[in-house]
Amino acid sequence: MNGLGGVDRIRGDLFGGLTAGVVALPLALAFGVASGAGAAAGLYGAIALGLIAALFGGTRMQISGPTGPMTVVFASVLVAVGGDIAMAMAAVLVGGLIQIGLGLCKAGGLVRFIPYPVVSGFMSGIGVIIILLQIAPAVGARPLSSPLEKVLSLPETLAAFNWQAALLAALTLIIVFKTPMRYSRIVPAPLIALIAITLFSVLFGLQVPVIGEIPMGLPELTIPKFSIETWTTILVLGGTLALLGSIDSLLTSLVADSVTRTRHESNRELIGQGAGNILCAFVGGLPGAGATMRTVVNIKAGGRGRLSGVAHALFLLALLLGAAPLATQIPLAVLAGILIKVGVDILDYRLLKLLKSAPRTDVAVMGAVFGLTVFVDLIVAVGAGVAMSMGLIIHRLIQQVSFSVKPVAEGPGSAMEGAVRIIEIDGPFFFGSASRLLDRADQVMETGAVVFDCTRVPFMDLSAQFALEEMIERLKDIEIPAFVAVADDQYEALARLKAPHIPPSILFRDFDSALSAARGATGA
């Protein structure tokens, strides 16, 4: 039984890998062209990253290669370095090294802390970018490097309109959107469109821009180029690629986990992705990440192990070695149509459908990330989105904390009535709420002693500890003794702080002990 099970698993991995390879072929060519590095770069990247990540990554059934987000970023890298491939590959090399560093530092689990509205706005923004950038090649015009440039150059694009290219793009879109699932399970719709529309263009002699010559055989060694003058630029661009590639890959790993009910090794996945992107830098390949669609296709076709990713890469390598000349006549409009479908699929319809009913703050974060992604910068968008989400969480935490000042009732007519006042803090006491404590100083100036009741504080950071010390120091200056009641864990934290104005003599583990000490200080 084990032998038969092993054979079935190998068969499933081989079939899954080959199926993913068939899906990957048109996408690799399209992403390569869209990046500005050429169709061959897309194939080199799919092979190099796909092989290394499959062997050394932490998600056994994941298929890696060029993706929409990574292609968009690499295209901007290529523009930033003036089209210098060697310098762009230096950024890819740095990105791979940073990814390995993130894996070694156990940073893989951090992707789980990125808020969903940030991911949603980012992915929808990427989808819109891909769609906007493919409008020009879809109508036979010159490809542009940024969405904003695309919008501003709309008159130029319309002036260069080629009806033959537009026809091919329209036919491609019909195929990729309308092919019944029962057929696309056997032969992926993008591959059907690639072959059928290319044959149509060749047979009828249509005059449209095509891919052109693709180098046949193994890629030549590329030496990434560094210089003192460009080091900062290379580091920033490499960091951008690393961050995006890591997020993209680990999100795909989470999808694979949900489909197969397994658990990936996030840190190992980052190391495998980094090693694969380093190899891409030396073969002139397009950098990439874990590809969600290709991974799901692999799993649905039976892939469950590393062999599936290896089979996917070797299949593309065989095509590169034997069938590269056949790709020279593929129209760019066909690739544009395939990528428009990719862009449409990337849009996050799950949240878009909930825009009216979702919390306004989450919609605002998603909208801000979306706008920054499309018109500014991808990493700026993610950073701003995370910062906005953190700010909203801090605001909510601040609303949960309450500060109240009240006297201790000693009985009607007692001479000690109101001699001790309590500052009660209820809720998270941290940098966002610490200043509110100092605002209560005027309310306790005319009293005999003060008790800070922090027994209902779940956590207290350094800013709060310093604010507490400053308040006690103010009271000490006007000779009002202060006492602090805290829970056990906060007691240990304040004791370790060794603050001169919060000595152990005024710290208590319960409120009653602190109150007794305060009454004793007032002579009660």
Image (spheres, helix red, strand yellow):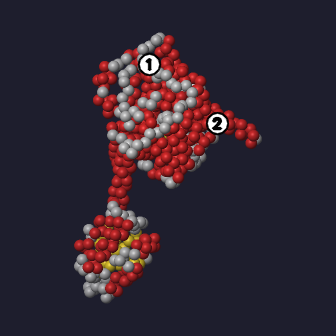
Q: 400 and 366: which one is in front?
A: 366
Residue holding disc 2: 13
Residue farthest front in this picture: 228
The residue positioned 37% from the left and 17% from the top of the image is 162
- The C terminus - image quarter: bottom left
Whether residue 29 sits left or right of residue 389 in the image: it is: right
* Mark 1, secondary structure of its residue: helix
Please tell me how crowded label 2 is: few (under 14), some (14-19), or many (20+) other residues with Cα within 10 Å.
many
Whether residue 394 sits left or right of residue 53 in the image: it is: left
Number of dots carrying numbers:
2
The residue positioned 31% from the left and 76% from the top of the image is 472
* Mark 2, secondary structure of its residue: helix
Work out whether residue 447 can be spotted. Answer: no
In the rendering, which numbered label is found on residue 398? none
Residue 409 position (above or below residue 104): below
Mark-to-mark CA distance, 2 and 1: 35 Å
The residue positioned 40% from the left and 69% from the top of the image is 456
Work out whether residue 67 can be spotted. Answer: yes
Measuring from the top left, give residue 170's x and y in whole percent. 43, 20
Measuring from the top left, give residue 463's x and y in whole percent. 35, 66
Identity, as a three-letter code, of the amino acid under mark 1? Leu
- The N terminus - image quarter: top right
Please tell me how crowded label 1 is: few (under 14), some (14-19), or many (20+) other residues with Cα within 10 Å.
many
Measuring from the top left, give residue 431's x and y in whole percent. 34, 63
Identity, as a three-letter code, of the amino acid under mark 2? Asp
The residue positioned 49% from the left and 31% from the top of the image is 41
Q: 130 and 188: which one is in front?
A: 130
Residue holding disc 1: 168
| CB-based contact (under 8 Å), mark 2 and mark 1 | no
Q: Earlier in the sequence, mark 2 or mark 1?
A: 2
Measuring from the top left, give residue 234's x and y in whole percent. 41, 43
Q: 71 and 459: which one is in front?
A: 71
